[in-house]
Image: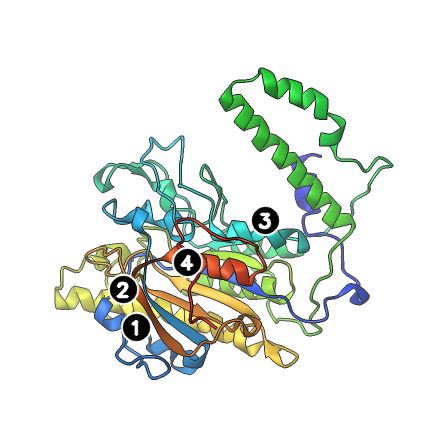
Amino acid sequence: MTVPWLESIAAGAPVKATDALAEPPLRAAFFFMPNGVRPDHWTPPGDGEDFELTPHLQPFANLKSEILLLENLWNKNSVGRNGHWPKVPAWLSGGFVERTTGGDLDSGGATVDQAMAQHIGHETPLPSLELGLDPPRTGIDTAGGGFPRALGSFLSWADPNTPVPKEIVPQAAFDRLFRSGKSRVSGDDRSVLDLVRDQAASLRAKGSRDDQARLDEYFESVRSIERRLEIASKPQKRWINKERLPIERPGPGIPSDHKEHLHLMMEILVLAFWTDTTRIATFMIGDAQSSQDYSFLPGVKGNWHGLSHHRDIPETRSQYEKIVNWNIGQMAWFLGKLQALKEGPRSVLDSSMILFGATLKCGNRHDPEDLPTIVAGRAKGLLKPGRRVRFEKKTPLCNLHLSMLQRMGVKADSFGDSTGTLSGLG
């Protein structure tokens, strides 16, 4: 049970055509965009199907019928705190992020993607896939409220104290999809936890509260590994596509060209969904204060976060707007990829729920209300896109998460700070 061996078989055994699903599965992805938007370039006039496309929404011109523009959602637990770092974990959890010294991270709760993965992750080789572009940051942002920068480096959290690392190297992400191996199961197929149950209970009883928590976490980790081993030897039914996506194995390292880096990671996610290697994914277009230099764009000289604090200076604001528009354009490119891949009468996008949004409304003022939120895809008929839907002001974003959880088949009555599900999505 060495870690390298377990990782090598994580992709599971091959699935025979006779064991394939009869129809495509439902997938869910969560795309985080840092540094907010310009509100008047995001919020459109018009309601329902008659909403207009503002400058920020213009990249979705060919996909207007595939998106739901949702308004007045927020995370109340992120209000009145640092503008960036603690808002990122709260985006998918709704939790209250504690201000700590960095060695004892507390995100306030597990994220919705991991709640989904716990429910259906056993059905695919990878329970979930976490991708991004920026390496994790370290240290405390003393000028930004004293929060650990690591909080803004991870979008997915298995529990309040455990971030799920994201992959930022294209070749490594690609290899996770296609590493394969064979497992050999010995005669005794009982859980190792069953074999040591009495000893484990005795040891736990003698430990402190912290020790008991650590033991519980350890035993659950062992059980999780056993479940992965079982999947590898007895794979679940999966969706099989007959065609192949034309993407070669990326070269080593991170591409120097930012667009190439982003597109490679997005194509890998497309491939992961299309091959049913996973059905749950998160994607960080940048970390909480992404300082990616966008001088490669015409008329832009500087980095994303720096230009987001434009102070309404026309020249600076114009550069910030170009960066936001460019990134939304890449999101539209990704959705177009999913829409172009057909699965019988549907496309991959038709069988998906893709949440795209930010933890700030105005990048300059750090507004926490009415967060930029789009859900793309039809969720196999469970969503009715092509509309602008306005909810009551200060509606919990977790109401959306609960609605998505239920559509994924998770029997949950609440999530985070939810007060119910969102009506009007389907």
- Quadrant in the picture for residue 340: bottom right
Q: Residue at x 63, y 18 (%)?
A: 203
Residue 37, label in figure: 2
Q: CA distance from mark 1 to mark 3?
A: 35 Å
Image location of residue 223, percent across then percent down: 67, 37
User: Which callout, 3 or 4, points at the residue further toward the start of the chain?
Assistant: 3
Check if mark 2's residue and mark 1's residue have beta carbons within 8 Å. Answer: yes
Residue plotted at (49% across, 61% down): 404
Judged left or right of residue 103, residue 251 is: right
Taking depth in this image into account, of 400 and 338 the one nearest to the observer is: 400
Camera sees residue 181 = no
Circle 3 crowding by C-alpha within 10 Å: few under 14, some 14–19, many from 20: some
Q: Which mark is residue 294?
A: none
Badge 3 amino acid: Gln
Dot 2, how many residues are within 10 Å of its Cα: few (below 14), some (14-19), or many (20+)? many
Image vertical order of residue 123 relative to residue 188, above or below: below
Task: Say which label, 4 or 1, has the lower sequence index.
Answer: 1
Q: Secondary structure at mark 1?
A: loop
Residue type at the position of mark 1: His
